[in-house]
């Protein structure tokens, strides 16, 4: 299921039950950094109380009539001092040009994604297999931004799902609200699980800032 925000065009939903598989995000072929980490290490880093901790939540998209609560993806404001994201294919972090500054102006940056480049977030815990994802984007209107998520399910299997392809606005605007397949909830059997978010640009440059997730998928 995908919900398009007013005034934005969601080009295609790359969401189908056949997309589920034990594979890595779009950036995996270009980057051996974070996604080369063993599942054992991922589980160790995000085990126990780390996955049960309370994250600060806000309503950053309320100016666009979205009053859901979100938390920032780790490094989702892309600080220029180091965001923790794994970059490949010429992707880079730059000072933010987004006037909205949803996560606050202090240290804010953006990820610049030329065509063919990608960025993968650090893993963080979500409370369900169906998180809602939203971010700010701008760029070449002819470009496309491919959005994937990768989960580590309780048995240690990596499951990557494409959640959508977004056409950026010429000016900074919020993305559509992207929601994962309901089938993931059954695969992950509920509870808190690690998740990484992946962006890949095609056909032109796309800039992304302020990446958020609603870990409990309220609608």
Image (cartoon, helix red, strand yellow):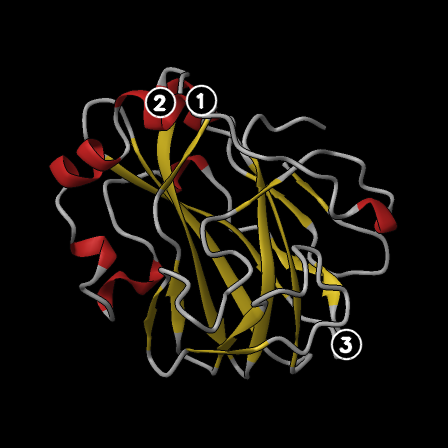
Q: Give the residue number, with chain letter if any, for mark 2.
A: 188
Q: Are marks 1 and 2 in contact (CB under 8 Å)?
A: yes
Residue 96 vertical placement versus 146 (above, below): below
114 horizontally vs 28: left or right: right
Where is residue 175 shown, x and y percent of the image?
A: 69, 57
Could you tell me how far apart the alpha carbons at marks 1 and 3 are, in whole angstroms?
A: 35 Å
Q: Are marks 3 and 2 in contact (CB under 8 Å)?
A: no
183 horizontally vs 175: left or right: left
Where is residue 49 shown, x and y percent of the image?
A: 33, 21
**Closer to the eye: label 3 or 2:** 3
What residue sits 51% from the left and 33% below the top? 181
Residue 204 vertical placement versus 29 (above, below): below
35 horizontally vs 60: left or right: left
Q: Give the residue number, with chain letter if any, for mark 1.
A: 185
Q: Residues within 10 Å of mark 3 (few under 14, many from 20)?
A: some
Q: Are marks 1 and 3 in contact (CB under 8 Å)?
A: no
Q: Give the residue number, with chain letter if any, for mark 3.
A: 171
Give the quadrant of the N terminus. Answer: top right
| Helix, strand or loop under label 2 | helix
Where is residue 21 shown, x and y percent of the image?
A: 28, 40
């Amino acid at each position: 299921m995908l919900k398009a925000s007013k005034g934005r065009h969601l080009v295609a939903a790359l969401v189908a039950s056949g997309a589920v598989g034990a594979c890595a995000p779009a950036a995996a072929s270009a980057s051996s950094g974070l996604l080369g980490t063993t599942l054992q290490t991922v589980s160790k880093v995000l085990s126990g109380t780390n996955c049960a901790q309370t994250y600060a939540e806000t309503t950053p998209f309320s100016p666009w009539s979205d009053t859901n609560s979100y938390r920032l993806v780790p490094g989702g404001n892309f600080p220029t001092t180091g965001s923790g994201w794994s970059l490949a294919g010429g992707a880079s972090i730059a000072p933010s040009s987004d006037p909205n500054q949803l996560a606050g102006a202090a240290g804010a940056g953006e990820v610049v994604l030329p065509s063919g480049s990608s960025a993968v977030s650090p893993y963080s815990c979500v409370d369900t297999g169906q998180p809602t994802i939203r971010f700010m984007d701008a760029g070449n209107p002819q470009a496309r931004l491919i959005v994937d998520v990768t989960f580590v399910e309780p048995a240690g299997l990596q499951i990557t799902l494409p959640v959508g392809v977004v056409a950026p606005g010429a000016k900074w605007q919020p993305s559509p609200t992207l929601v994962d397949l309901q089938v993931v909830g059954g695969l992950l059997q509920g509870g808190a699980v690690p998740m990484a978010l992946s962006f890949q640009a095609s056909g032109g440059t796309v800039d992304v800032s302020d990446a958020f997730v609603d870990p409990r998928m309220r609608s």
